[in-house]
Image (cartoon, rainbow, N blue to C red):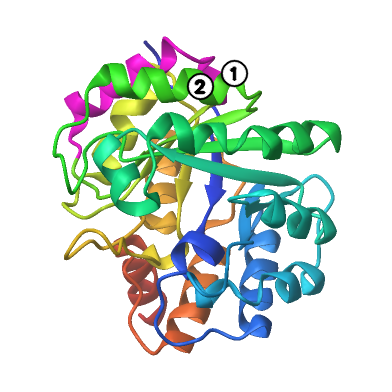
Amino acid sequence: MSLPQKVKIVEVGPRDGLQNEKESVPAEVKIELVNRLTAAGFPNIEAASFVSPKWVPQMATSRDVMAGITRKPGVIYSALTPNMQGFEAALAAQADEVVIFGAASEAFSQRNINCSIAESIARFAPVAQAAKDHGLRLRASVSTAFGCPYQGDVPLAAVADVVARMRDLGCDEIDIADTIGVSTPRKTQAVMETAIGAFRIDGLSGHFHDTYGQALANIYASLELGIAIFHSSVSGLGGCPYAKGATGNVATEDVLYLMNGLGIETGIDLDAVVDAGQFISAFLGRKGASRAGSAILAKRAG
């Protein structure tokens, strides 16, 4: 099968990338980051998370961030909403899309939210209905779809079941996430083919962490199946608190370099993303995790 001619890149750095940072990142820095990403041409930016600040203190500024960003018409600004309280906050903040989430691993669900997968997804029913009632896009993220830190392998049937449940809630898009970054290309294709069997292919996205250096290979394996939406994080921001040594999301700069090399259209300016990555890395006081970003910066320096 030929590769897609165009892909949508969902930039998750401002939310998924920054949420695990131990030092507080002020709202004005997050606003500047989102504005830079908007200017770079992203069609969808995950900008906020309306979860309890007790659990994720880094996201306590989400209301201020959503109020302060310069919005570009046509760009989707997403917010994570774990419950109706989060949904109301996202609605008030004028989010374009709300994101719900559930695990494909029963052990992960029990360990993290003390309930079964079925129970966790049932809790999202009122959020899903409210999103539809207010004309908001609804996206679901299926975590640990490729492997779990507690139970190891996750059965393909479990992935199909969660995708079908999310579909039945009325989701517009469903992310298939390698939360701990353990997948390899053949495994990736088996999981993605399972997801394709349960949901329309143009609404499925790949969310790969790069813990074992396999994220780009897994993205290519997904492209071969016709998947055309991928998540990435500027400068490779983020980590997974459940996997020791996890390096977090695949770096956006690396994904864009791959897409440019394959002649796949993204509509995103790689140089502008490198600049945004340098901006946030400088604030955090460390070198960015993107290989392509580092190479481009070195080339610029001559």
Which residue is the site of mark 2? 165
Q: Find numbered disc 2 in the image and state the secondary structure of the residue it sits on.
A: helix
Q: Please tell me the numbered disc located at residue 168.
A: 1
> Which residue is drawn at the image coordinates 70% and 69% (left, top)?
35
Query: Mark 1 is on which residue type?
Result: Asp
Q: Are marks 2 and 1 in contact (CB under 8 Å)?
A: yes
Secondary structure mostly seen in the magenta stretch: helix
Residue at 45% x, 13% y: name it: 198
**Residue 193 shown in magenta:** yes
Residue interval drawn in magenta: 183-203
Disc 1 packing (10 Å; few <14; some 14–19; many ≥20): few
- Secondary structure state at the residue bearing disc 1: helix
For residue 111, above or below residue 93: above
Q: How packed is label 2: few (under 14 Cα within 10 Å), some, or many (20 or more)? A: some
Residue at image x 22%, y 23%? 155
Q: Residue 298 placed where, x, y %?
A: 33, 76
Image coordinates of residue 150 in percent, x first then y, are 17, 47
Residue 225 quadrant:
top left
- Tell me residue 55's x, y (percent): 48, 70
